[in-house]
Image (cartoon, rainbow, N blue to C red):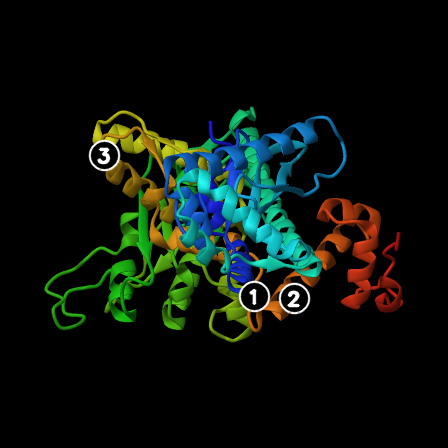
Amino acid sequence: MELVNWTELTNLRVIRKLSEIIRSRWNLGIAFTDVEGSIRAVPEGSVYEFDREMCQLVASSKEGFDACCATLKDVTLTLRDEHKDSNETPRPHWRTCHAGMIEVGVPIVIRGRYLGAVFVSGFIKKESGDSQKDEVVQLVRKFNVDTEAAKKSIQQVPVLGESNIDYLTELLELIVEEIVGFQTELYKKERRINQLNKELVTRYQYGNIIGKSRTMQDVYRLLDKISGSESTVMIQGENGTGKELVAKAVHYNGPRKDKIFVVQNCSAFNDNLLDSELFGHVKGSFTGAMGDKKGLFEVADGGTFFLDEIGEMSPTLQVKLLRVLQEGTFLPVGGTKPKKVDVRIIAATNRDLKKMVAKGEFREDLYYRVNVINVHLPSLRERRDDIPVLVEYFLQRQSERKKVPIKSISKRAMERLMDYDWPGNVRELENEIERLVVLAGDELAVGDDLLSQRIKAEVEREMLEGKKIAGRLPDAVEALERKMIYEELKKVRWNKTKAADTLGISRRNLIRKVAKYGLDQRKNRGGLDSLRDA
């Protein structure tokens, strides 16, 4: 099983930017090898590309290409063996390759586990000078490279001094740091998902309301208490959180469960039509009133009336609703004789009624009448732990409806579903699962490639973008380096020894960089900062 999605890693913004810096400054490209030393994806594509003309000449033959791959594999396995036999922080490894040029690899170690390495190869050390170039020309002849072509190409091979080599190494270490951070977050999410799937709970459903998170358990306990009563209930929550499902659960678990349950969305009609819809009208009360009509309050007599989006009701209708709540009576449109009903009211809104009361948009006396018992439904982003349970439920329901085998969601797709903010809440998630089931066709496993573009785009923007880099290349690298050092120092409470170990640099080098970027906590701490400078 693949431990790392190399293509996804190389699409991280920071890694792409660092790769561009290396390419533009020295005409060198980076490559990745996995734990077995096999070449993996590079930022420019899915196969290794040789950036220098000399490397292309060597790799143009089968023998030369095999030699390139063998060298990378040998360095990778050497790094793996060094990590296996040592508990120290992994360090870069330098080697002269089969063609006489320098190759440097930095190991990728996550949670003590060696996963591969990142490489840059194909340059010459400055102190070696022309003698090294002559040696390269002689070495590449055994790979059927024409001598004249080799002499011409060797002039394009980058020659790096000690300071440039140190700079290049630091860039490679930054790439590894970004990979480690990204993979660590993925591991955390994977553990969380596995924990949620294995977690045994006594209750994950109330009627058709699905959820086993702590917030939903609190909602269930509240519903248990209120369902047996006759009190008016106010359900508040964003669109798509399942307010109507809660209203039905209250009704069908209460004393009126054998009576009618009536639903009306108060935003569906204008003021006049809603008046007629709720309270009915008498013949001739307005143009088109050809006969008497029962209102929904009369229809709901003895049962439960669910008024959705009550915050959209006009002040005039608020007065009539208040009278129903206080006296149980109302007047049909155009009527003169009051009608009496016995109705339990459950109201719902996605608006802040308290603020509306303060602005004079909603009657205060009505607010207290409808808000006897308040049920707050959390948004889906506030209960992400419920997403795996909901996904499983919707997959099963879609399977039953479409009469197809139950499909499963891949681990990566589930991670992305949990990362997304779901502005449309449970309703949006249900629609997304239905879409995935349709697009998957006969495939039983649903991959993240089928997810809606809005989900992939949002997740990539928020989680895969990394740190933004702009401006001149050296300035951009310094800005990135400064940010990474600062964030790591904060994380370890300014302990430079721990920070240096995590960042993969020496403590002396870290102290130098802290001074360079003005990050000395003793100078910047102020009266409230108690971070320790180790």
* Comparing labels 2 and 3, the label whose residue is closer to the camera: 2
Check disc 1 and give the amino acid type: Ile
Instruction: Say what secondary structure mark 2 lies in.
Output: helix
Q: Is residue 108 left or right of residue 59?
A: right
Q: Closer to the N terminus: mark 1 or mark 3? A: 3
Q: Closer to the N terminus: mark 2 or mark 3? A: 3
Residue 373 lies, in percent from the top left, at 54, 49
Cα gap from disc 1 to disc 3, whole angstroms: 41 Å
The circle on residue 441 is 3
The circle on residue 469 is 1
Instruction: Say what secondary structure mark 3 lies in.
Output: loop
Is 298 or 381 nearer to us in this picture? 381
Check disc 3 and give the amino acid type: Gly
Q: Is residue 151 left or right of residue 274?
A: right
Residue 302 lies, in percent from the top left, at 35, 43
Cα gap from disc 2 to disc 3, whole angstroms: 47 Å
Q: Marks 1 and 2: in contact by CB < 8 Å?
A: yes
Q: Is residue 196 left or right of residue 248?
A: right
Read off the residue under disc 2. 479
Q: Quadrant of residue 77?
A: top right
> Compared to 426, does 80 lie above or below?
above
* Comparing labels 1 and 3, the label whose residue is closer to the camera: 1
Cα gap from disc 2 to disc 1, whole angstroms: 8 Å
**Residue at point 65% right, 66% down?**
479
